[in-house]
């Protein structure tokens, strides 16, 4: 079964932040864009429609004032009325010119422009007429002024409708912008919270499973039942737990197999390592180390002193291996006075020499002065005859996988036994490396 294609925890957290940030950014951009559009529309409304309405209102007031002044001139002759009339005309002309300068989208209706220009033209003409009679202006301009007032009223009504429509649009646009911005923000928060909750739940479930697996391993059950199909960090941790369980199970077997005296790996661990190296196609040397005349020493000095002799060999082997150029080795104790060393072929001979030299130097110190001086231990054979047992020595039998066509733990052990039997026939400490061709 393939692994589930899930996002990792870090990717999920990043995704949650990214979604929230993206929707927040979109909401901000949308809000700013809407605000800019509404600000532009508001400016157009103020500088366009409102301004046009105010100008139209001012022009209407100018026309109504002129109408009142001209009617007053028919009744009262007063030079002050002339000057006031002149100022009103000038105000009207200035306001009309400003009205014409409105932006293009606020251009005046054609009928209003025609009425205004006609009124302005006749007004200027009458102003240039000297010694005009009272009532002349009123009779000449009244119809045109009435038409212009009518057009101004129509223009003001249309402006008011436009203003009301645009104000309603601004209000609805503001409401819509607020709702969309709020929706985008809430949606981003919702997605972020959803991702956060999924991460929290995943962490909770995975943590619970890992705690259960830890308790399972601590109780000695190394076959972890845990989901290893996830592709996130917890999936990797679960797979590490399974590997750890397998390794602990292997170590437990090694521990149970280990020699209680030397605490070195026993037969099971040694055979496992041999098979592993053979499966990997590794070339290695198998050294079988045996203490000669150990039984006579153990019978003479007791099992506690015998344990010291075994511990001495262990320490000598450890020290020699630690000083070797390679660290690709295994030191095992298969029981009694027999040890096994798996190491590379290029250092095995030097290792054997150093081990033998150290043992020959230190082993005699385990004997008392008399036995050491005599060079043997007195004893009796099974027929109760007096015999002399030599001091302990070492026999190191070495078989390399290069000398075997089909190496296996059984084949290696069988060849080592043959070499050991030969070495036992020789006096003193000796080593022998099988360098024969493959067989």
Image (spheres, rainbow, N blue to C red):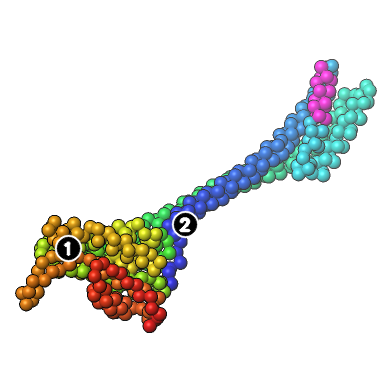
- Residue 387 location, x and y as percent? 11, 71
- The answer to whether 382 appears left or right of 119 in the picture is left
Q: Residue furthest bottom?
A: 439
Q: Main secondary structure of the magenta part?
A: helix
Q: Is 82 within the magenta?
A: yes
Mark with earlier residue (2, 1): 2
User: In the displayed structure, would residue 15 be above or below residue 61?
Assistant: below
Q: Quadrant of residue 254?
A: bottom left
Magenta part of the chain: 80-94
- Residue 271 location, x and y as percent? 29, 73
Quarter of the image where the C terminus is located: bottom left
Q: Quadrant of residue 13?
A: bottom left
Q: Is 17 within the magenta?
A: no
Name which residue lies at 91% across and 24% down: 132
Quarter of the image where the N terminus is located: bottom left
User: In the displayed structure, would residue 27 be above or below residue 203?
Assistant: above
Residue at disc 1, secondary structure:
loop
Residue at disc 2, secondary structure:
helix
Q: Report whether residue 70 is seen.
A: no
Count up the numbered dots: 2
Q: Along the line of sight, which residue is nearer the eye, 397 or 83?
A: 397
Q: Residue furthest front?
A: 374
Name which residue lies at 13% across and 69% down: 388
Q: Report whether residue 434 is seen.
A: yes
Question: Which residue is under mark 2?
Answer: 11
Question: Which residue is under mark 1?
Answer: 375
Q: Along the line of sight, which residue is nearer the eye, 435 or 67?
A: 435
- The answer to whether 222 appears left or right of 385 in the picture is right
- Residue 149 location, x and y as percent? 77, 37
User: In the displayed structure, would residue 363 be above or below residue 1?
Assistant: above
């Amino acid at each position: 079964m393939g692994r589930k294609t899930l996002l990792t925890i870090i990717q999920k957290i990043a995704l949650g932040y990214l979604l929230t940030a993206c929707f927040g950014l979109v909401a901000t951009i949308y809000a700013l864009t809407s605000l800019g559009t509404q600000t532009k529309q508001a400016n157009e409304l103020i500088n366009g429609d409102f301004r046009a309405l105010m100008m139209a209102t001012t022009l209407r007031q100018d026309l109504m004032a002129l109408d009142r002044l001209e009617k007053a001139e028919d009744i009262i002759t007063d030079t002050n009325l002339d000057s006031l009339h002149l100022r009103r005309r000038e105000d009207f002309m200035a306001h009309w010119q400003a009205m014409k300068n409105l932006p293009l989208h606020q251009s005046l209706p054609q009928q209003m422009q025609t009425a205004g220009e006609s009124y302005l033209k006749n007004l200027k003409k009458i102003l240039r007429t000297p010694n005009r009679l009272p009532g002349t202006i009123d009779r000449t301009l009244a119809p045109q002024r009435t038409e212009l007032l009518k057009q101004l009223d129509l223009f003001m009504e249309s402006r008011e409708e436009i203003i009301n429509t645009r104000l309603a649009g601004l209000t609805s646009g503001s409401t819509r912008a607020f709702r969309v911005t709020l929706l985008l923000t809430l949606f981003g928060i919702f997605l972020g919270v959803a991702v956060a909750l999924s991460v929290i739940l995943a962490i909770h479930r995975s943590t619970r499973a890992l705690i259960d697996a830890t308790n399972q391993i601590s109780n000695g059950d190394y076959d972890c039942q845990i989901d290893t199909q996830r592709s996130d960090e917890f999936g990797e941790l679960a797979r590490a737990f399974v590997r750890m369980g397998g390794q602990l199970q292997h170590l437990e077997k090694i521990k149970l197999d280990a020699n209680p005296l030397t605490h070195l790996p026993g037969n099971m661990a040694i055979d496992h390592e041999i098979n592993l190296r053979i499966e990997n196609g590794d070339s290695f040397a198998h050294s079988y180390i045996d203490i000669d005349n150990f039984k006579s020493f153990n019978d003479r000095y007791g099992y506690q002193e015998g344990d010291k002799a075994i511990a001495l060999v262990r320490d000598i082997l450890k020290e020699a291996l630690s000083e070797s150029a390679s660290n690709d080795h295994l030191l095992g104790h298969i029981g009694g006075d027999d040890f096994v060393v798996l190491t590379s072929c290029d250092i095995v001979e030097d290792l054997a020499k150093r081990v033998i030299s150290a043992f020959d130097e230190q082993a005699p110190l385990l004997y008392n002065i008399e036995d050491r001086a005599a060079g043997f231990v007195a004893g009796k054979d099974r027929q109760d005859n007096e015999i002399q047992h030599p001091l302990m020595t070492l026999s190191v039998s070495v078989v390399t996988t290069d000398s075997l066509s089909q190496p296996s733990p059984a084949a290696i052990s069988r060849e080592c036994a043959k070499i050991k039997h030969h070495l036992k026939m020789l006096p003193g400490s000796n080593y022998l490396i099988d360098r024969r061709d493959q067989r």
